[in-house]
Amino acid sequence: MANRSITLTLPHPDDTDRLGAALGQQFLRHSSLLASNGLNLRLDGTLGAGKTCLVRSLIRSLGWNGPVKSPTFSLVESYLLLGNPFNHFDFYRFEDPMEFEDAGFRDLFGPGMICATEWTEKAEPFVPAPDLSISLAHEGLGRRAELTAHTPAGKAILSGLHGDGPADA
Ligand SMILES: Nc1ncnc2c1ncn2[C@@H]1O[C@H](COP(=O)(O)OP(=O)(O)OP(=O)(O)O)[C@@H](O)[C@H]1O
Ligand SMILES: [Mg+2]
């Protein structure tokens, strides 16, 4: 399967929130796929790129009304969304990727589980491969997002989203 990719410009933080909500709509649309397959969502980008903001708006759009803390210190924050565990990881503080195995985090990935990961490279090669990756980069005062589907599940989630360029339509 060829990877499918779209790019979006996000000039304002509200645009990042809107992208998170749009992703949430896709999660709702494909809830049975998520319940059977699960989904690994990888967030890439430098410090302050907007990874946590995007995941926060995704989590809220799936009906969560409580606080959504950054997992920078806890390493993982877990929710129950759409009847599925949703695990939001930040591996930034890992000094060794083996910490992923030692913490038993592998058990939090798999069918029926939704995982969003920040600083994924710090847990490689142990962290399972993504279905969908989102790379956020600074562009002027705003951000640019590139979303890439790596699996049929990722492609299903991406299918209802539209990028900026004609090539993305
Ligand atoms: N589209 C945007 N345009 C401008 N600023 C944005 C945009 N999206 C998010 N931001 C801002 O960027 C910052 C992003 O912070 P956030 O904690 O989400 O970054 P992060 O990528 O998770 O960083 P870290 O690697 O430290 O976890 C916030 O201050 C937010 O308001
Ligand atoms: Mg973050």
Image (cartoon, grey):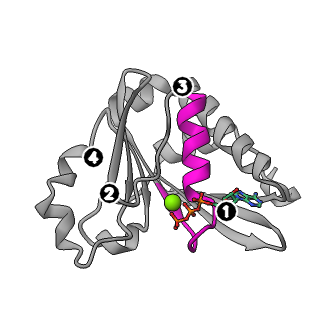
Q: Is mark 1 on a helix, strand or loop?
A: strand
Q: Which amino acid does label 4 sit on?
A: Phe
Which of discs 3 and 4 lies nearer the camera? The answer is 3
Q: Name the residue under label 4.
A: 109
First in sequence: mark 3 vs mark 2: 3
Q: Mark 3 points at which residue?
A: 65
Which of discs 4 and 2 lies nearer the camera? The answer is 2
Q: Is mark 4 within 8 Å of ligand 2?
A: no
The residue sitting at 30% across, 69% down in the picture is 123
| Residue 148 magenta-highlighted | no
Q: Is mark 3 within 8 Å of ligand 1?
A: no
Q: In this view, does 166 lie to the left or right of 113?
A: right
Residue 20 spot, x, y in % from top left: 64, 42
Question: What are the residue bounds of the magenta stretch?
Answer: 42-62
Q: Mark 1 points at which residue?
A: 146
Q: What element carries label 4?
A: loop
Q: How far apart are marks 1 and 3 (CA)?
A: 28 Å
Q: Is residue 1 left or right of residue 12?
A: left
Q: What residue type is labelled 2?
A: Leu
